[in-house]
Image: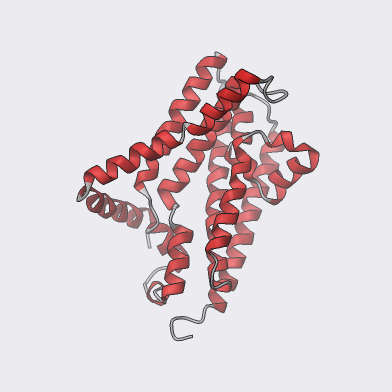
């Protein structure tokens, strides 16, 4: 199966469905876009009334949050419904049909999990990041830009792995939506630099639950704070997390008892 072609066709069908209620779709886009500015506004309030976070200016924090919004906007648009759809299909006994299609179940779920209204967050993130770059009078070198793109790619590997991990738990735990909320709540850690959590926090959010890939490290790349060694370590971590999630997915598939019990 050509996953990209199926995704594009499914996205086109989804857009047609959304256009049947276009004002509803537009309201969702606007609401999602405005919601993305809540955290930067809170950050502005913090910096207006305090010295802020050590080692990070207001512009740098804003850049981090803008990049994080971009990363989450990309993932939410492309495969944001992967875990939710899989868990619902398993609970409703509909996953059997996915397993009988002429495609790998994981790739089929990926190809049919787009959420187009979340593209507003992506646009908002770009606006925030550009504004932050203007505040910083940022001059971006080719190396920093390429490092940023590389880590942005790794962030999508991690975020997709997280979707797969949570979806896999749906095969093992009957009421797994609480786990979905738990893992997604952990991603809020990335709204601020993971360096504020100390050495242990840096290790945890870099190598165990690498949420730093979504905002902290891409922002650090643009600011010229990363070495080639760090990039290699982050790549190994992202793909190791993906490998772990795929192992858990295979375990979940084996444990799946189908609609017949």
Residue at image coords 53%, 28%: 40
Is 130 on the left or on the right of 178, as rendered? Answer: left
Is 29 on the left or on the right of 229, as rendered? Answer: left
| Residue 125 versus residue 104 in the image, above or below | above
Residue at image coords 67%, 43%: 234
Percent position of residue 61, x then y: 60, 26
Is 187 on the left or on the right of 196, as rendered? Answer: left
The way the protein has been coloured in the rendering is: secondary structure
Percent position of residue 245, x then y: 60, 61
Percent position of residue 224, x then y: 65, 24
Q: Nearer the viewer, residue 249 or 259?
A: 259
Q: Quadrant of the N terminus?
A: bottom left
Residue at image coords 37%, 59%: 112
Percent position of residue 202, x then y: 74, 40
Q: Nearer the viewer, residue 5 or 184?
A: 184
**Residue 178 sits in quarter:** bottom right
| Residue 259 versus residue 187 in the image, above or below | below
């Amino acid at each position: 199966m050509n996953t990209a072609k199926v995704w594009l066709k499914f996205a086109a069908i989804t857009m047609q469905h959304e256009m049947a209620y276009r004002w509803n779709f537009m309201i969702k886009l606007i609401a999602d876009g405005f919601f993305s500015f809540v955290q930067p506004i809170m950050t502005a309030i913090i910096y207006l009334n305090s010295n802020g976070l050590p080692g990070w200016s207001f512009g740098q924090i804003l850049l981090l949050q803008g990049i994080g919004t971009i990363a989450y906007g990309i993932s939410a648009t492309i495969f944001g419904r992967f875990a939710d759809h899989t868990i619902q299909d398993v609970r409703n006994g509909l996953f059997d049909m996915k397993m009988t299609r002429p495609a790998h179940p994981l790739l089929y779920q990926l190809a049919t999990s787009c959420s187009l209204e979340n593209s507003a967050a992506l646009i908002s993130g770009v606006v925030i990041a550009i504004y932050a770059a203007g505040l910083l009078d940022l001059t971006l070198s080719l190396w920093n830009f390429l490092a940023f793109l590389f880590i942005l790619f790794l962030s999508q590997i991690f975020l997709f792995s997280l979707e797969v991990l949570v979806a896999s738990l749906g095969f093992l735990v009957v009421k797994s939506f609480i786990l979905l909320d738990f893992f997604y709540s952990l991603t809020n850690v990335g709204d601020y630099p993971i360096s504020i959590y100390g050495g242990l926090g840096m290790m945890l959010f870099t190598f165990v639950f690498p949420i730093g890939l979504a905002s902290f490290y891409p922002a650090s790349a643009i600011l010229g704070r990363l070495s080639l060694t760090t990039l290699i370590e982050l790549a190994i971590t992202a793909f190791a997390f993906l490998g772990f999630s795929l192992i858990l997915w295979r375990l979940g598939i084996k444990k799946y008892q189908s609609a017949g019990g």
